[in-house]
Image (cartoon, rainbow, N blue to C red):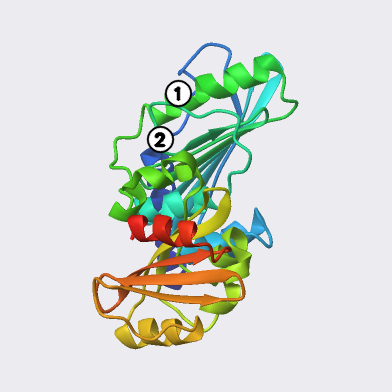
Amino acid sequence: MKTTAKVLFLLLMVITLNAQVKDFPKLMEDDFSGLKITREQTFDGNSLWGYINGGADIFLEYGLNNLLLQEIEVNHNKLKIEIYRMTDPYAAFGIYSVSHYKCEEKYQSLKFSCVTQYQIQCAIGEYYISIINTNGSKDEQELSKRVFDIIISKIHSDEVTLPEVFKNSLLKQNIEQIKYFRGILGVQNGISEWYDYFDKFEGYEIFVLPTKLSGSAVNVAQIKFKSSSDAKLFLGNVGIETGDIEKITEKITNDSGRFVKMLNETTMIFVKSYSDSSEIKELIKKIL
């Protein structure tokens, strides 16, 4: 009986893994001629450590279902395709937001995408996608874009909606730099100077946009804590008394400013400026 049970368990695992692979918006060898898939493998939260040792924790912090890895070759050009299926679109956007740097261009058809000589990244629906080429040649870049187009055409999911504060015209210039965190690893990777603000909390969500107003650095964030007591403790940590809902509270010290507008008992807009000028204060109030 034990042997039969083990066989049935293994069979169920194989069926489950095959179903997961088929469910991915993956590349198929008949998608275009000359395409050869040289490796295809799936990873879940436990096995991800075997693929990206030291980097798996942040994916788990955001919420990972599984990863499909494909390595392909077309006319001696090689690509690595990583399709991370996260738990929800915000998890996918979050991991994308802390993974892209110095984008050279973006896909106009997508809200969140980043193209460089060696890599294409995007967040679309619950998927974070990364396509990496080996040499950065023109042929490899063109192949990457062709593969990318095929993969995203197979995804039909809703994209992330940003909080209303980030629709302000003063923030449009750098909106593609917005980041989303669900834990301290995200904060550490995306805005390390705020680490001490959040290392004692859990269960929060942060959208933050590093930007400039009139040439001065400003970080604009919408933060949601899991409880009103956490929100009050955070305000105390940054030197601000608990403010009334929908009213602006500010604290100016040492040539910098902190501004808060409570949206409800657990959610706030928090702005950290690195200037105490009256001009910056007025611009921040226009955002709030």
Of residue 151 and residue 27, the one placed in the foreground of this image is 151
The residue type indicated by label 1 comes to Asp
Res. 189 image quadrant? bottom right
Residue 164 disc label: none
Q: Quadrant of the N terminus?
A: bottom left
Res. 110 image quadrant? top left
**Residue at 28% over, 42% down:** 158
Number of other residues with Cα within 10 Å of mark 1, as a class: few under 14, some 14 to 19, many 20 or more = few
What is the residue that sits farthest to the top in this orientation? 33
Q: Is residue 269 left or right of residue 217?
A: left
Q: Is residue 255 above or below residue 128?
A: below
**Residue at 58% over, 44% down:** 100
Of residue 124 and residue 6, the one placed in the foreground of this image is 124
**Residue at 36% over, 30% down:** 154
Residue 25 disc label: 2
- Dot 1 falls on a residue whose secondary structure is helix
- Dot 2 falls on a residue whose secondary structure is loop
Q: Is residue 264 above or below residue 131?
A: below
In this figure, which residue is indicated by the disc labeled 1? 149
First of labels 2, 1 by sequence position: 2
